[in-house]
Image: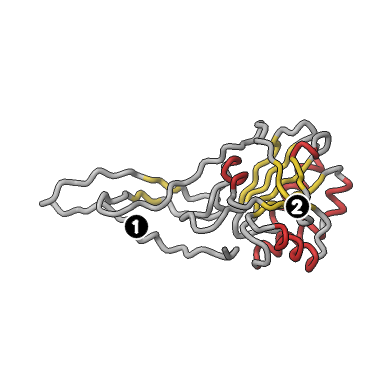
Amino acid sequence: MACSSISNHIHPFIQFQSRNPKSSPPRSLPIIARSSQSQIYGLKLPTTLVNYSPLCVPPKSLICAKVSKGGVPPSFTLKDQDGKNVSLSKFKGKPVVVYFYPADETPGCTKQACAFRDSYEKFKKAGAEVVGISGDDSSSHKAFAKKYRLPYTLLSDEGNKVRKEWGVPSDLFGTLPGRQTYVLDKKGVVQLVYNNQFQPEKHVDETLKLLQSL
């Protein structure tokens, strides 16, 4: 799946409630989007009140993050770019940045990967490890890491099992895997959850700010 911008048009399945006086008003589910920087999708949305019509199938439900600040995320064991098993517990005792991204070799994800690469020495100085996770297989990760000289671990979450267990939200209409970064401290406790689909480099800035303050 491409790591690209999503149309800002209103989803065709979202309809305003009919005002036909001859028909009884349909039962509807109001959804309020606040005019602010969305912490889930990184989108600025106008303040609107829309209703789902019962005559159509509503879009995919939003996924609420299961892993939040102050929590301990589910452990995992995934294969890295060399096909070796890597467990989250391997990083216990040092801060670790775990970032979920949509796919290898897509524009936004490549920018993000290279931004982590370019700041890798700063992460090392802060005593932290960096781990990238997507649904691509190990061979795709290996080619991606080699092409862009990525010095950190990339893990293959085929089937997006870990992504689902961590509750990483998808984009606005569920068409792309979400881009979300977590910073875990030495004890494995989450100190930051940052989501911005369309400004991938900001994930690096936000995580460094936190790590340098610990």
Which residue bears the numbered disc 1? 13
Q: Residue at x 10, y 52 (%)?
A: 22
> What amino acid is at disc 1?
Phe
Q: List x then y, in percent, for residue 212.
A: 82, 43
Against 71, residue 200 (above or below) is: below
Q: List x then y, in percent, for residue 91.
A: 80, 39
Query: From the image, which quarter does the C terminus lie in?
Result: top right
Q: What count of labels does the image hold?
A: 2
Q: Earlier in the sequence, mark 1 or mark 2?
A: 1
Q: Residue at x 65, y 54 (%)?
A: 134
Against 210, residue 22 (above or below) is: below
> Which label sits in the foreground, 1 or 2?
2
Against 194, residue 3 (above or below) is: below
Which residue bears the numbered disc 2? 80
Element type where label 1 sits in the image: loop
Q: List x then y, in percent, for residue 199.
A: 64, 59
Taking depth in this image into account, of 64 and 103 the one nearest to the observer is 103
Element type where label 2 sits in the image: strand
